[in-house]
Image (tube, rainbow, N blue to C red):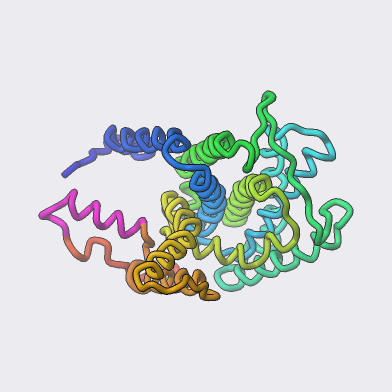
Amino acid sequence: MRIVFKRSYDADIRLFKHGAQAFWYILLLVVAIALPYLVGEFWLGEFTSMLIWAVAGMGLMLLVGHTGQASLGHAAFLAVGAYANVLLMEKLGLPFLLSLPLAGVAAGLAGALVALPTTKLHGIYMAIATMAIAILTEDIIVILEPWTGGVNGLFAPDIEIFGVNFNRYGNITGMYWLYLGITLLVLLGYRNTLRSPLGRSFAAVRDSEISAQAMGVNLARTRTLAFAMSCAITGIAGAMMGHFSGIFNNETFNIVISITLLLMIVIGGIGFIHGAFVGAFVIVFLPQGISFTRDALSGVFGSSSVTIPGLESGVFGAILIAVILFEPMGLYGRWLKIRTYFELFPFYRRDMFKRQKSYLKTERMR
């Protein structure tokens, strides 16, 4: 059993809780860097896709998990990041190292413009408003055909950094390492944001807006900043997705992507940064797992492999229902319970993670 004593505010917000945690994360980083030497190109491409979804998941997690605002329209900001990145590279000739952050800034500004008139919306109303924006974005992409290519889409140019070409089919190893570096930078910025006063404001708004306002938190400003930062991270993921897919159009960033993103973080664990990575792993590798399982069963029973339409969606939906019914904290939340059980054994109590059914009295005034 490990006991961590926090004697100061700095100890409460430090990057790692203790040395053992830092060791395991460093070990994980070493494995991630060495991954191209451990797996083939196909699986390396899948892990690269997982990194893209993890960055997009972190963007939505900042809004939903740490600020408490629902969104079903983040596919629109994926599109803003993807199109802005390609246009900056092709029209202005900017290198990828400049176009990528500027694409994130463009998506963040678009998110701020959306957040300004919707800061007083909550729950389902906020979700409906953002969903309408996602649907509208598909039509806007078609209307702006001279810049976006309309239904024909845009081709993302290869990434070149200091004379090195990064391409999914020509240099997947280099692209994986590049995307791993981008993911780590986003992760570090995200973690530091949560440790800052602004991150504490996000959590206060999520837990109780009335209590946060009583403590001097500006609700409109905090929610707008959360939406803008969330969209900026999502825009970076959109730029990464555009280069990974090679070509994209208005159908690439549809409402299904927004719903998938939300379900992804629910399965991974809302409110945990780890939940974005766990959910991304499920999203990317679930189809492969279903495919291998189907082929294995076909070999066992001696029958031909039959593709069942909608099987992946059905399995994903079943996992989602199971998570909501039996583990609302998501897969990472389940891992926390298992880890805590062994850390506190034999002092673990079953009600330790029981969901709080009551609410703050101040919330009754809403």
Q: Return the residue nearer the eye: 144 or 306.
A: 306
* Residue 346 sits inside the magenta stretch: yes
- Residue 60, how many percent across, how many down? 55, 56
Left or right: residue 102 versus residue 314 is right
- Residue 104, how many percent across, how many down? 67, 44
Q: Quadrant for residue 72, please give it.
A: bottom right
Q: Return the residue nearer the eye: 10 or 42.
A: 42
Helix, strand or loop: magenta stretch: helix
- Residue 76, how many percent across, how many down? 69, 59
Give the magenta range.
332-348
Residue furthest left as drawn = 346
The answer to whether residue 233 is seen in the rendering is yes
Is 192 placed above or below 230 here? Answer: above
Q: Return the residue nearer the eye: 353 or 34.
A: 34
Count of numbered circles in the view: 0
- Residue 241, how many percent across, how many down? 64, 49
x 53%, y 54%: residue: 57
Is 128 placed above or below 206 here? Answer: below
